[in-house]
Amino acid sequence: MGFYWEITDVGGDRVKRYDWPAKSMTPVDGMDAVLRGWRKEAIREREEFLNLQKDLGRTGDRTTAKIMKECASYQLQVQRACTLMLPWVGVPDTNQDVLPSSLWPIDLMDALDHVSWRLLLCFG
């Protein structure tokens, strides 16, 4: 699923733009700390999936190894989603480029929605 809208760019092409479900939330104290915690969790889980993928690859279980690779890829997307949201709920990372939510990569939509719903559930 996911939320997006389409616009026509200057070249006349139709492009999708992400519509952030949590954009109307008022940032509160601790929201950026929670996002940073989720990001660290995603980094840790990604490493675990990559290690499992490697171990499974050695045993010859390529099917499950592929699933672990996909899980690791999704955790990287969650990590990126958390990073993109930081400036909008608190303090951005040092030297972080601040992008409006409408310019967030549409290929991250599932992870962006996942993190957005977690924010909405925690901070309503």
Image (spheres, rainbow, N blue to C red):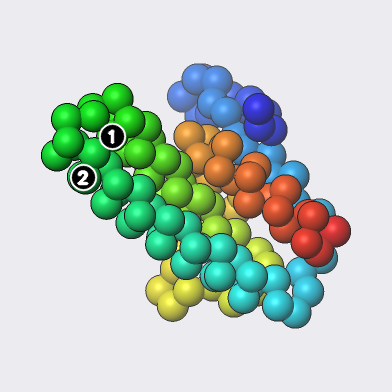
The type of residue carrying mark 1 is: Ala
Q: Percent from the top left, x then y, of residue 96?
A: 44, 68
Question: Disc 2 vs disc 1: Cβ atoms closer than 8 Å?
Answer: yes
Q: Percent from the top left, x then y, of residue 52?
A: 30, 47
Is residue 103 visible in the rendered image? The answer is: no
The residue drawn where x is 17% and y is 36% is 59
Instruction: State the mark number for residue 29.
Output: none
The front one of 114 and 6 is: 114
The crowding category of the residue bearing disc 1, from other C-alpha atoms within 10 Å (few below 14, some 14 to 19, many at least 20), is many
Q: Is residue 77 above or below residue 70?
A: below
Q: Percent from the top left, x then y, of residue 18?
A: 62, 38
Q: Secondary structure at mark 1?
A: helix
Q: CA distance from mark 2 to mark 1?
A: 7 Å
In the displayed structure, does residue 37 sit left or right of residue 1?
A: left
Residue, disc 1: 65
The type of residue carrying mark 2 is: Lys
The front one of 89 and 63 is: 63
In the displayed structure, does residue 107 sit left or right of residue 23?
A: left
